[in-house]
């Protein structure tokens, strides 16, 4: 039985798309890109994934480190890393990047995704959830980067799309916001 460590430490629940992806992805070496204070990393770690959690916020990484130490979670490594560098250096079976790309340098997004492709093992998975700005739903939040219609699907040409959508949701303040979500498997 999994204890709700997220709740115990005041973390938000794991992203719903991470939870769904774990129904088909077996525990493996995993990268949580833009992990913040670790809501997905802790969840994945409890399921037996070997997680590398990265974020450019030292305070968030310190908070995650304290959970790792307190819970003796030897399968989670957390460190400060600027995703804009796009030089991951290790290969993974699963790379999750949920609500993170919209905070990156727009000029680096293609390079970041290309590096994710390069660092995903054959048969491995990428999960991305990112805000969009379209004619029908212009993004009401001034993120540095937002996806255009079809842009994320095009970035994964040649991969098997397990899931892809560009759905509109309502934010906590009532604003309508469109997100692109992809779960793609790299060819073997």
Image (cartoon, helix red, strand yellow):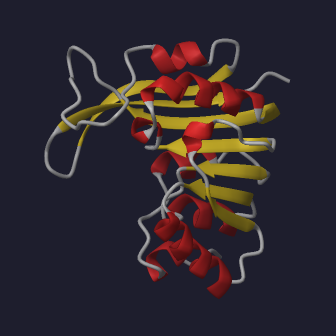
Which residue occupies 78% across, 42% down?
Answer: 89
Above or below: residue 140 compared with residue 63 = above
Closer to the camera, 39 or 78? 78
> Looking at the rendering, which quadrant does residue 79 occupy?
bottom right
Left or right of 170? Residue 99 is right
Q: Is residue 23 above or below residue 124?
A: below
Rendering coords of residue 31 (x, y %): 68, 49
Q: Is residue 46 left or right of residue 173?
A: right
Q: Tell which of 17 and 39 is nearer to you.
A: 39
Q: Residue at x 20, y 52 (%)?
A: 172
The residue drawn where x is 66% and y is 24% is: 114
**Which of the image's four quarters has the N terminus?**
bottom right
Q: Is residue 83 left or right of residue 141?
A: right
Q: Position of residue 49 (x, y in %)?
A: 74, 59
Looking at this view, is 31 or 61 the one in front? 61
Q: Quadrant of residue 12?
A: bottom left
Which residue is found at the position 69% from the left and 19% from the top? 159
View extreme (bottom): residue: 70
Q: Is residue 44 above or below residue 112?
A: below
């Amino acid at each position: 039985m999994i204890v709700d460590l997220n709740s115990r430490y005041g973390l938000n629940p794991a992203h719903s798309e991470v939870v769904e992806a774990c129904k088909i992805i077996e525990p493996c070496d995993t990268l949580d890109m833009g992990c913040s204070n670790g809501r997905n990393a802790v969840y994945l770690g409890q399921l037996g994934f070997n997680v590398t959690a990265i974020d450019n916020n030292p305070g968030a990484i310190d908070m995650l480190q304290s959970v790792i130490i307190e819970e003796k979670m030897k399968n989670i490594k957390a460190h400060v890393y600027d995703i804009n560098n796009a030089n991951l250096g290790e290969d993974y079976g699963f790379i999750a990047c949920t609500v993170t790309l919209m905070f990156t340098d727009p000029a680096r997004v293609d390079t970041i995704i290309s590096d994710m492709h390069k660092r995903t093992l054959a048969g491995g998975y990428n999960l991305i959830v990112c805000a969009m700005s379209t004619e029908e739903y212009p993004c009401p939040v001034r993120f540095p980067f937002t996806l255009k219609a079809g842009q994320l699907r095009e970035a994964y040409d040649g991969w098997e799309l397990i899931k892809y959508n560009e759905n509109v949701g309502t934010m906590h303040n009532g604003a309508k916001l469109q997100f692109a979500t992809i779960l793609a498997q790299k060819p073997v």
